[in-house]
């Protein structure tokens, strides 16, 4: 059967895009791919904001295993339908690629299949966009079987509209297509698309099964009081989780360090057991497929009794990060679930800046997960929600909370 082979080829092709370059890796296996970043300021996105986005794109490229050798910014009123940036800028970038011997050009804006195709004829290297890089990172960081399947679905959904005749034939790669695999009058591209769609459908079925198993587990260990840490990637959710619960989860100065949720017990007071979950971070232009395929993993957010919205107070664009988080959160959980905004990394702020933030966000809690300051106030606020809810009555329900001690 060609199916499974086609599947692994599809996933592998995509996963390998950023981290390996066959011609280079032959010369020097440890050499990183050289990337040039392209950003666009528009009427909606100021140059200042576009630069923040570029800094973030640089971190994404770095996390994906590339080294940024140059950047190109452009201010445009309207995006060019064929190339986004217009002919002149394309030539400029092609020259930069020649000069640096770059391997890839990464656009901060999303590119359509035809735009990628056009750009690849004009610029002599691989062309990627932000979503493509994010998907590569997710693929690299996926550890559990479920995360791997979720990422593959998102990759295939991303790839589908970008499939062109230039792709080597998937079915042939898969070791020959059986009789009847190609419908009458179907072009190779149509066959490829059909294979991808079928693979997506199969994987979604697999995810549904995994979801059922999870739901059954959830029923057994329904938490007493469940707080979910959510927020922009690198905001410090895992560090805060560790500070609150001594969970020992990975916290790192890289984007998307966490993909799978971890849940641990925390005591909010004598006979006040609660559980806290750490979740995958959000980011601007998170590929749509990723949000939907991670929905089941993010069910810890949907089922939370309290949302702890962690914000990196030291980030220059923290307000935009809050807006993006709010938008994604709206897709994941009911509006009436109580929320606490937790401004983190206050150790990095000037005192005046901290005062300014406090006065503008009087309901928020201010902490430094790293310096372990403000944690008692945060716990006190969590305790207030606990006492206000129906949890006070079932406070002795430690059995359930114990079920989470080993993580989930
Ligand atoms: N200075 C300072 N750094 C912090 C603080 N909290 C977290 N960090 C650092 O910020 C970086 C990201 O922290 P994580 O806890 O991994 O962030 P996260 O939100 O879990 O990130 P993802 O899992 O990638 O979405 C790490 O280098 C942390 O050491 C803080 O209060 N102060
Ligand atoms: Mg994390």
Image (cartoon, rainbow, N blue to C red):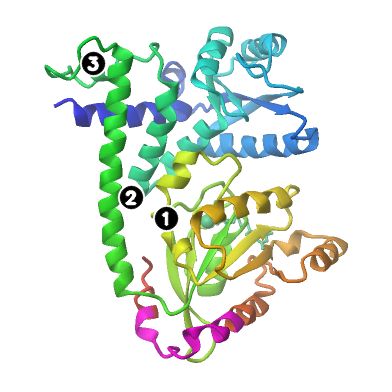
Quadrant of residue 6 within the rendered picture: top left
**Image spot of residue 116 (x, y percent):** 53, 18
Check if mark 3's residue and mark 1's residue have beta carbons within 8 Å: no
Q: Is mark 3 within 8 Å of ligand 1?
A: no
Residue 351 occupies which quadrant of the picture?
A: bottom right
Q: Mark 1–mark 2 contact, CB under 8 Å?
A: yes
Circle 2 residues within 10 Å: few <14, some 14–19, many ≥20: some
Q: From the image, which quarter does the C terminus lie in?
A: bottom left
Please report the residue visible at 47 percent of the width from the left and 37 percent of the height from the top: 135
User: Mark 3 vs mark 2: which is more N-terminal?
Assistant: 2
Residue 396 appears left or right of 381? left
**Location of mark 2 (residue):** 146
Considering depth in this image, is 356 or 374 the residue closer to the camera?
Answer: 356
* Residue at 33% over, 50% down: 146
**CA gap, disc 1 to disc 2?**
9 Å
Mark closer to the chain start, 3 or 1: 3
Label 1's element? loop
**Residue 40, quarter of picture:** top right
Up the image or down, 223 lies above or below 253; here it is below
State the residue at coordinates (36%, 38%): 152
Numbered disc 3: secondary structure:
helix
- Residue 172 numbered mark, or none: 3
Residue 63 placed where, x, y %?
A: 54, 39
Depth check: 84 or 36 in front?
Answer: 84
Q: Quadrant of ligand 1?
A: bottom right
The magenta stretch spans which residues? 384-400
Residue position for label 1 = 260
Instruction: Find the distance from the CA under tag 3 to the CA under tag 2.
Output: 28 Å
* Residue positioned 47% across, 69% down in the render: 247
């Amino acid at each position: 059967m060609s199916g499974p082979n086609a599947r692994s080829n599809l996933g592998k092709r995509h996963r390998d895009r950023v981290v390996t370059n066959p011609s280079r890796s032959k010369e020097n296996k440890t050499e990183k791919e050289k990337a040039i970043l392209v950003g666009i300021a528009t009427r909606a996105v100021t140059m200042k904001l576009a630069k923040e986005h570029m800094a973030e794109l640089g971190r994404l490229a770095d996390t994906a295993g590339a080294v940024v050798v140059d950047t190109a910014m452009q201010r445009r009123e309207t995006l060019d339908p064929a190339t986004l940036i217009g002919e002149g800028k394309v030539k400029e970038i092609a020259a930069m690629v020649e000069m640096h011997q770059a391997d890839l050009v990464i656009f901060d804006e999303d590119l359509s299949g035809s735009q990628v195709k056009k750009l690849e004829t004009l610029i002599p290297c691989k062309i990627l966009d932000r979503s493509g890089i994010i998907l590569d990172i997710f693929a690299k960081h996926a550890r559990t079987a479920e995360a791997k399947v979720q990422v593959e679905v998102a990759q295939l959904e991303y790839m589908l509209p970008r499939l062109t005749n230039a792709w080597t034939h998937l079915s042939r790669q898969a070791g020959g297509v059986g009789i009847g695999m190609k419908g009458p009058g179907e072009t190779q591209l149509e066959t490829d698309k059909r294979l991808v769609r079928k693979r997506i459908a199969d994987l979604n079925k697999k995810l549904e099964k995994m979801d059922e198993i999870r739901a059954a587990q959830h029923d057994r260990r329904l938490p007493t009081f469940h707080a979910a840490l959510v927020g922009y990637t690198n905001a410090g959710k895992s560090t805060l989780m560790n500070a609150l619960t001594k969970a020992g989860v990975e916290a790192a100065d890289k984007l998307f360090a966490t993909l799978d949720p971890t849940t641990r017990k925390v005591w909010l007071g004598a006979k006040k057991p609660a559980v806290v979950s750490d979740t995958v971070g959000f980011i601007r232009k998170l590929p749509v497929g990723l949000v939907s395929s991670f929905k089941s993993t993010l069910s810890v957010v949907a089922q939370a009794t309290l949302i702890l919205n962690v914000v990196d107070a030291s980030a220059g664009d923290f307000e935009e990060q809050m807006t993006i988080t709010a938008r994604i959160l709206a897709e994941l959980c009911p509006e009436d679930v109580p929320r606490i905004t937790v401004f983190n990394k206050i150790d990095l702020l000037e005192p005046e800046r901290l005062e300014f933030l406090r006065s503008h966000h009087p309901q928020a809690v201010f902490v430094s997960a790293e310096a372990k300051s403000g944690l008692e106030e945060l716990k006190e606020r969590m305790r207030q929600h606990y006492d206000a809810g129906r949890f006070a009555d079932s406070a002795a329900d430690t059995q359930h909370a114990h079920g989470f001690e080993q993580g989930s």
